[in-house]
Structures are given as structure tokens and as C-alpha cells.
């Protein structure tokens, strides 16, 4: 039992990375990773790719995806600025039903893909870091300007700091 | 998002489909029929020697430049217009607001949106087609539908509902007016993109000044330009204009880049539009009149072109081919229900580009380059569907006005933090001053020679980002004076006159010679 996977199509909603794990009918009941940390947003803090459509075709999967009985999606979003993140309009296609019709000759799809850039910078560019530090500087200025407004009441935050404080009385 | 190979084949399929419907295709077909021999048209040699190869190449190149790369096949069409749902919604409600205001103007003044002109009026208009400026209709009741200032208010209130927007300043909010978390380029990325503006590369706008002998750069550059023109290669022309166009070659080079050839059928098309103008009277016409009278006619450089502007803009408001750009623009054309069928319905094409205060300034600089109305018209239409529509619609495109505003604010904040903070504290947010420059692509603010040098770069890089860079560079240039002002009005006064500025040195210094 279990089905063959040809392609997974979904619309992203503010997920930065997705991993997919599958469980197969035969063999030990283990979860196997077939897509590992696929990047969906170019920068987790910025909109690019946040609401785009993506597909994960069979030939990009790391393990054999025949006789799949369960699929598990692991969504990651390292940036704290988004309220929610999820994936929507999830569609899983078996081989017989090739996802969207593609109206171009087959020789076109046999072109070689571009090599992926593999270089990774060792250290961030100091100029870039200093440029970003300007925002911190303005924030300190803003805070200094409003100093008298309110105390940073660490312990009287309502609700969200509900650690039971030790009391001596 | 599609993978590289799928994307490429989709692109090819689309370009082939688009070219099938073009006049180039029918010309090629005719040529193939008349040429003797068994299927000689298919051999590469034929293409090469008859010059068809270049024409085909230019057509493909122009398609690639105009249309965005295809998105995922599962994506609905509105996704191609704008991938972010909340931006689509914002654009939708902005359009609704504009339409409401148009409708209320119609009912208030009791005039129809469109109406057929009586025969006598048609005749009169035809007679004074070349001197429409002499007509002085009473337009005191009309008002521009919106001005850049109103649009800025909309952009300022744009928020991502999935983003944590606190009222208090934190690392999450931007300190400027735009609060949308789009990715914009920083200086190192811009340096790489605009590498031809570098300090050790010759530039028209710097190296052609009177002090520099022309044999250093100018003569050679002009010679290369002539060669590019002789080759008739769009891609080469685009690369060439990144260093600026010699004045004598600009008109032809720009037309080559945009693949405008002014064929007999194009002239015929223009004449058709003209007859549409003569037959029907649209409400938009009055708005166009009003706008030209308010802006271009008052401008020292452009007032002479008043009649050209009417001709081009009136035809533009009837051109249905402009509707094609709504496939990739976040905007949607307004629709209207027409009572009764027949002629009126067919010819009533409300193109959906509603002129705002200053719209005619997109056309005015082109009048310096093209004197033939049909060519001028085509150039403007192509410039509009490639670039200018992005300056007044809400989208997340890197050349869209939202990204430009954010790029401007980010550049200014990271490179002149003291100035940015000072202006913010006195209530003169820099974007409030620079917004109108960017919405009009600086037309009407710079001296014309400088403006054309700037537009050279827009065409050369196929991007409007240079507008934001220039706006930031202007602030940097006036930083010392701006640090001394204490109010928005004073800051505006410092930056009121940009007509003495030299664009290319400003850009170069800001991008390449500023120590950060």
C-alpha cells in the first residue's frame, strides 16, 4: 500500500525554510528526510518569496518516494517579525497526474540547470555592519529623548511576566 | 517560484506565442513565401544576410525586458500582477477611491464619462488638431483626481498584517515613513549593479564638460555610438547608454532600445487613435487639459510643447494596447457599464490610466527628442508600459514606488544618520520632500539635459532604482544646509531648486566616492 509521489505544490505564507519527511509502507517505520531545509524566502526578514508558489518535484527529493504512507512538513522561520507562518493550498500529485500542463517541447526541459553558487562568506562585511548599526544609534537617541516618559518596569508587566516572584512578606 | 529549466522553457514558450501575433511574424512569413527555392527561409544564412536575424533578436530582447519572468504554473493570474496579497488589496482600495472621486466629479458637474461629439465639434477639433493649446475651455470646476501628496499618504499607511507593527520605535519599525518590510539593495549591491557609473569609467555628463578635451573620451564614445546604431542591436544600445547618450544620437538610440521603428502600420495606428479622439469626448480629456495647463505650460522648458502633449495624451487615453500592461502591473483597469450596444461600446475605451497632477511631465522631455507625433507617441507608450506605470501603483516590484521610497529612506538613514535623525526630529521627513521627484521621475525638477542623462541610465539599466539613489544623493549634497534648518518649510526651500544640479557627478560621488 501507499502512494508514489511525483510533485508537491504549495503556496508559501512567510515560511523561510521547509523540510519534508516521509514514512514508507515497506521497511522500518522511520521518518526519512526527502527535502532538507529548502529555502523559500531569500531573506527571512523581508517579503521576497513570502507568498510565492513553490513546487518540490520528485527529481529533487533526497530519498526514494514510492509507497509513501505519511508526509510530514517541517516549517522554519528564524525571523521574529512575522506573526504567523504556514503553507497554503498544499497539493500532492501522484505520477499519473502531472501537475500543471506544460505546453513546451520536451527537448526544452532537458536543458542543464545553472550551477548553484556555493560560496559562503566567512565574516560579514564590516561596512555593512556599521551601516546597520546606524539604526541602533537612532534608537538610542530616541530612547534618550523620551527618558522621563516611563520607567522600564521589568516586574510590573501585566500578564506576560507571570513568574511567581519570591515574596518576603 | 519555478526552477531554472522550467522557467526558461516557459519564457521561450511565451515569447514565441507573443511574437506569433506581431507584425514581424507576418512580415517574415511574407518574405518566406516570396523568396525562391525550397524553404530557404529556414536556413540561418538567410536570416543573417537579410537582416531579419537582428530584427528578431531585438524583438525577443524587448519581450524579455518588458515581461517579468514567468511565475509558477499553479499561481493564479493576479499573482503575476503582484505576489503579496495585502499589496493587491491596498492597490484595489486605492483604485476604488480614485474611481469614486471620478464618479462624484461626473455627477457633481453633470457631465458624462464619455460621449460622442456632434459633427460640427468634430470638424472644429480636426481643424485645430495642431494647435489645441489655443483652446481655453473653462476648467475651473475640474480638479486633478489626486496629487503625489495624496498617494504618499496611502503608501505611509501601508502595513503588512502579518508583521509585528508596534507603536513604539523598535528594531522592527523603520524610522522613515514607509513601514513595509521589503528587501532593498544596500550600497555594495548598488555599486555592483551600477558598475558602469564607476569613477574610472568615462561618463557623458562629466567627461564631456568644456574643460575636458574631447579627444580623451567624447570623440571615441560618439564613434562607438554610431557603430552601435549601424549594427541595429538593442542589447548593445542598452549597454552603451549606461555611460550616457551623445545628444545627437539619443533619439535613435532610445528608439532602438525600446524597439520602436515607426513602421507605416504604426503611423496608421496612430491616425486611428486620432480619429477616436475626434469622435468621442471623454471626461479624462478635461483632466488632461487641466494637468497640462497646470504643469507643463507653466514650465520654462516645456511650455512650447503644449500642443504635442495634448496630441499624445489624448491618443494615449484611447489606446487599448496599453491595457496589455495590466497583465504585469498591480493595477487593474476600471470598467464601466455602458447602456445600449453598438458603436459607443466599441469605441469607448477607458484605458484605465487616470492622469494625476503632473502626469503630462512623463511626456514632456520626450518632446525634445521626437518631432513626429506618431513616433513621439510610441516612445511615450513604451516608456509608460515599461517604467512609468510603476511610479503610481502599489507593488512590491524593486522598481515600484514603494521599494524606491524604502530604498531612498534606507540609503539616507545608513549613510547620513545625523541628517536623517535631524530632519525626522523637526518633522521634515525626507521622503515628504523627495516623493514628488521620484513619482515624476525628476521630470520638471532637473534641467532638461540633466534629466535626459538620468533617463539614459533608466533605460540602460532597465530599472528605476537610480531615481532613489539620485534623491538620496541630492540630500547628501545639501546636507550642510539641511542640518541648519528647523522646519519642513525651510527644508523644502533648501531643496526647492534642483535645476542647477549635475546628475552624473552626484550619483557617482554618492555611490562610489563616499566614505562610509
Image (tube, rainbow, N blue to C red):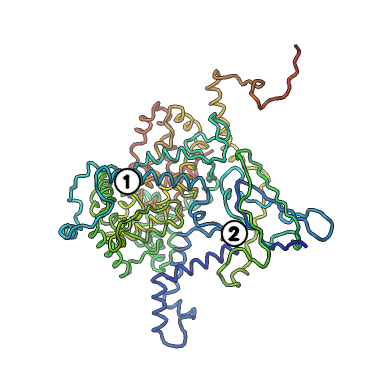
Rendered view: B435 above or below B281: above
**Left or right placement of residue B301 versus residue B395 in this view:** left
Q: Residues within 10 Å of mark 1 (few under 14, many from 20)?
A: some
Does any portion of residue B369 appear in the rendered image? no
Could you tell me which chain the residue with mark 2 belongs to?
B
Residues tagged by mark 1 and mark 2 found on one chain of the structure: yes
Residue that extends furthest to the front in the rendered view of this protein: B340
Q: Is mark 1 on a helix, strand or loop?
A: helix
Q: Residues within 10 Å of mark 2 (few under 14, many from 20)?
A: some
In the orientation shown, which residue stands out farthest toward the bottom?
B37
* Residue for point 29% across, 68% down: B268
- Position of residue B137 in the picture relative to residue B357 (left or right): left
The structure residue drawn at horizontal position 62% and vertical position 54%, both measured from the top left corner, is: A10
**Residue lying farthest right?**
A28
In which quadrant will I find the N terminus of chain A?
bottom right
Q: Which of A135 and B501 is in front in this view?
A: A135
Residue at (54% x, 38% y) in the render? B516
For this rendering, which residue is in front, B118 or B366? B118
Q: Is residue B513 above or below residue B419?
A: below
Q: Mark 1 points at which residue?
A: B102
Q: Which of marks 1 and 2 is nearer the N terminus?
A: 2
For label 2, the residue is B2
Quadrant in the picture for residue B241: bottom left
Query: Residue B341: which quarter of the image?
Result: bottom left
Dot 1: chain letter: B
Count how many numbered circles sit on residues in the image: 2
Q: Residue B5 in the image: x percent, y percent?
A: 60, 64
Residue A29 seen in the current view: yes
Q: Position of residue A159 (x, y in %)?
A: 65, 25
Identify the secondary structure beneath mark 2.
loop
Front one among A97 and A129:
A97
Relative image position of residue B204 (x, y in whole percent): 39, 53
Amino acid at each position: 500500500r501507499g502512494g508514489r509521489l511525483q510533485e508537491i505544490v504549495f503556496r508559501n505564507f512567510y515560511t523561510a525554510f521547509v523540510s519534508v519527511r516521509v514514512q514508507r509502507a515497506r521497511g522500518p517505520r522511520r521518518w526519512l528526510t526527502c527535502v532538507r531545509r529548502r529555502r523559500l524566502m531569500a531573506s527571512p526578514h523581508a517579503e521576497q518569496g513570502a507568498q510565492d508558489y513553490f513546487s518540490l518535484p520528485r527529481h529533487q527529493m533526497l530519498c526514494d518516494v514510492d509507497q509513501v504512507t505519511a508526509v510530514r512538513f517541517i516549517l522554519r522561520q528564524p525571523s521574529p517579525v512575522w506573526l504567523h507562518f504556514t503553507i497554503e493550498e498544499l497539493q500532492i500529485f501522484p505520477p499519473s497526474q502531472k501537475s500543471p500542463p506544460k505546453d513546451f517541447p520536451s527537448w526544452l526541459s532537458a536543458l542543464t540547470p545553472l550551477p548553484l553558487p556555493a560560496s559562503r562568506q566567512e565574516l560579514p562585511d564590516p561596512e555593512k555592519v556599521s551601516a546597520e548599526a546606524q539604526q541602533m544609534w537612532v534608537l538610542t537617541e530616541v530612547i534618550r529623548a523620551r527618558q522621563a516618559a516611563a520607567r522600564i518596569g521589568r516586574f510590573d508587566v501585566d500578564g506576560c511576566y507571570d513568574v511567581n516572584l519570591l515574596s518576603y512578606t | 517560484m519555478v526552477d531554472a529549466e522550467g522557467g526558461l522553457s516557459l519564457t521561450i514558450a511565451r515569447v514565441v506565442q507573443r511574437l506569433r501575433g506581431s507584425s514581424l511574424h507576418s512580415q517574415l512569413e511574407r518574405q518566406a513565401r516570396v523568396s525562391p527555392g525550397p524553404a530557404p527561409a529556414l536556413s540561418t544564412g538567410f536570416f543573417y544576410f537579410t537582416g531579419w536575424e537582428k530584427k528578431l533578436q531585438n524583438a525577443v530582447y524587448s519581450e524579455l525586458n518588458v515581461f517579468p519572468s514567468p511565475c509558477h504554473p499553479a499561481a493564479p493570474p493576479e499573482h503575476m500582477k503582484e505576489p503579496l496579497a495585502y499589496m493587491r488589496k491596498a492597490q484595489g482600495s486605492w483604485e476604488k477611491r480614485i474611481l469614486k472621486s471620478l464618479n462624484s466629479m461626473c455627477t457633481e458637474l453633470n457631465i458624462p464619462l464619455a460621449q460622442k461629439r456632434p459633427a460640427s465639434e468634430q470638424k472644429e477639433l480636426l481643424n485645430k488638431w495642431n494647435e489645441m493649446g489655443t483652446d481655453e475651455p473653462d476648467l475651473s470646476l475640474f480638479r486633478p483626481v489626486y496629487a503625489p501628496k495624496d498617494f504618499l499618504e496611502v503608501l505611509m499607511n501601508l502595513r503588512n498584517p502579518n508583521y509585528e507593527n508596534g507603536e513604539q520605535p523598535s528594531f522592527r519599525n523603520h524610522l522613515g515613513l514607509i513601514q513595509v518590510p521589503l528587501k532593498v539593495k544596500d550600497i555594495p549591491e548598488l555599486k555592483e549593479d551600477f558598475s558602469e557609473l564607476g569613477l574610472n569609467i568615462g561618463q557623458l555628463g562629466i567627461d564631456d564638460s568644456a574643460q575636458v578635451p574631447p579627444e580623451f573620451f567624447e570623440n571615441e564614445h560618439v564613434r562607438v555610438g554610431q557603430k552601435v546604431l549601424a549594427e541595429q542591436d538593442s542589447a548593445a544600445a542598452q549597454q552603451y547608454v549606461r555611460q550616457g547618450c551623445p545628444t545627437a544620437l539619443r533619439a535613435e538610440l532610445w528608439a532602438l532600445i525600446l524597439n520602436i521603428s515607426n513602421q507605416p502600420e504604426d503611423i496608421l495606428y496612430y491616425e486611428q487613435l486620432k480619429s477616436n479622439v475626434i469622435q468621442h469626448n471623454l471626461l479624462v480629456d478635461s483632466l488632461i487639459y487641466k494637468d497640462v495647463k497646470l504643469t507643463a505650460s507653466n514650465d520654462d522648458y516645456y511650455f512650447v510643447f503644449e500642443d504635442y502633449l495634448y496630441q499624445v495624451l489624448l491618443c494615449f487615453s484611447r489606446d487599448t494596447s496599453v491595457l496589455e500592461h495590466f497583465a504585469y502591473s498591480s493595477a487593474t483597469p476600471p470598467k464601466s457599464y455602458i447602456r445600449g450596444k453598438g458603436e459607443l461600446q466599441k469605441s469607448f475605451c477607458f484605458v484605465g490610466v487616470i492622469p494625476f497632477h503632473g502626469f503630462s511631465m512623463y511626456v514632456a522631455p520626450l518632446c525634445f527628442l521626437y518631432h513626429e507625433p506618431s513616433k513621439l507617441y510610441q516612445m511615450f507608450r513604451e516608456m509608460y508600459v515599461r517604467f512609468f506605470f510603476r511610479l503610481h501603483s502599489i507593488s512590491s516590484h524593486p522598481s515600484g514606488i514603494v521599494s524606491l521610497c524604502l530604498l531612498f529612506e534606507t540609503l539616507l538613514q545608513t549613510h547620513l544618520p545625523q541628517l536623517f535623525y535631524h530632519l525626522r526630529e523637526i518633522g521634515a521627513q525626507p521622503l515628504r520632500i523627495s516623493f514628488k521627484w521620484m513619482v515624476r521621475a525628476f521630470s520638471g525638477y532637473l534641467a532638461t539635459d540633466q534629466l535626459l542623462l538620468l533617463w539614459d541610465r533608466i533605460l540602460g539599466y532597465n530599472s528605476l532604482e537610480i531615481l532613489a539613489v539620485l534623491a538620496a544623493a541630492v540630500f547628501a549634497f545639501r546636507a550642510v544646509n539641511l542640518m541648519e534648518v528647523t522646519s519642513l518649510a525651510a527644508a523644502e526651500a533648501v531643496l526647492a531648486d534642483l535645476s542647477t544640479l549635475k546628475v552624473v557627478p552626484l550619483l557617482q560621488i554618492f555611490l562610489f566616492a563616499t566614505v562610509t
